Amino acid sequence: MGDKPKKWTDTYPQGTAEGNEECRFFKALARNKDYKWRSVSALSKESGLSLQRVEEILNKYYKKNMVFMNPKGEEQWGYWERIPQSIWDVNSKKSIARDDQDARIENSKS
C-alpha cells in the first residue's frame, strides 16, 4: 500500500479568502458520506463557487493526489478518503508518462 495522501484539512490555506473557498469546496466534496463521486456542477451548486473556480481547485488538488477523476465519468470527482483505494494508491498504478518512458527505454535497447 502506498502512502496515504494528505487530508484537506491539513493542506488548504486556512484564514484566507482562497482558503475559505477551498473549505466550501471540500465540504461539498468530502463531507457527505452518501457520495463517493460528485459532478463539477453539483460541487459548484453546493459550494456556491463558479464552475471555473471549482475546476481550478480540482486541478490544484489533483496535482497533489488528493482528488481523483472517476474512471467511469470525466465530470465526476472524488476525495481520496471516499473512493476505492486502488484509485488513489500510487503504488498500485503507473502513470501514462511512466509507461511511455518505460516503452522508450525498452525500444532503445533494441
Image (spheres, rainbow, N blue to C red):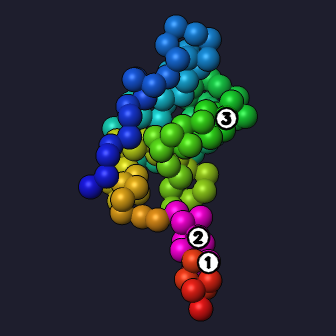
Magenta: main secondary structure equals helix
Which residue is the site of mark 3?
Answer: 56
Q: Residue at x 42, y 64 (%)?
A: 93
Which dot, 3 or 1, sits closer to the camera? 1
Is residue 84 in view from this perspective? no
Q: Residue placed farthest to the right in the image?
A: 52
Q: Residue placed farthest to the top in the image?
A: 15
Which residue is the site of mark 1?
Answer: 104
Please name whichever residue, 69 or 3, is drawn nearer the observer in this view of the structure: 3
Residue 69: x and y, percent?
Answer: 53, 52
Please name whichever residue, 107 or 11, is drawn nearer the observer in this view of the structure: 107
Q: CA distance from mark 3 to mark 1?
A: 33 Å
Quarter holding the N terminus is bottom left
What is the number of the mark on residue 75?
none
Residue 68: x and y, percent?
Answer: 50, 49
Residue 58: x and y, percent?
Answer: 59, 39
Magenta-drawn segment: 95-104
Q: Does the magenta portion include 32?
A: no
Q: Which of disc 3 and disc 2 is earlier in sequence?
A: 3
Three-letter amino acid code of the residue under disc 3: Glu
Which residue is the site of mark 2?
Answer: 101
Q: CA distance from mark 1 to mark 2?
A: 5 Å
Tag 1 near tag 2, CB within 8 Å: yes
Residue 80: x and y, percent?
Answer: 39, 44
Badge 3 crowding class, 10 Å Cα cut-off, few under 14, some 14 to 19, many 20 or more, is few
Q: CA distance from mark 2 to mark 3?
A: 28 Å
Q: Residue placed farthest to the bottom in the image?
A: 110
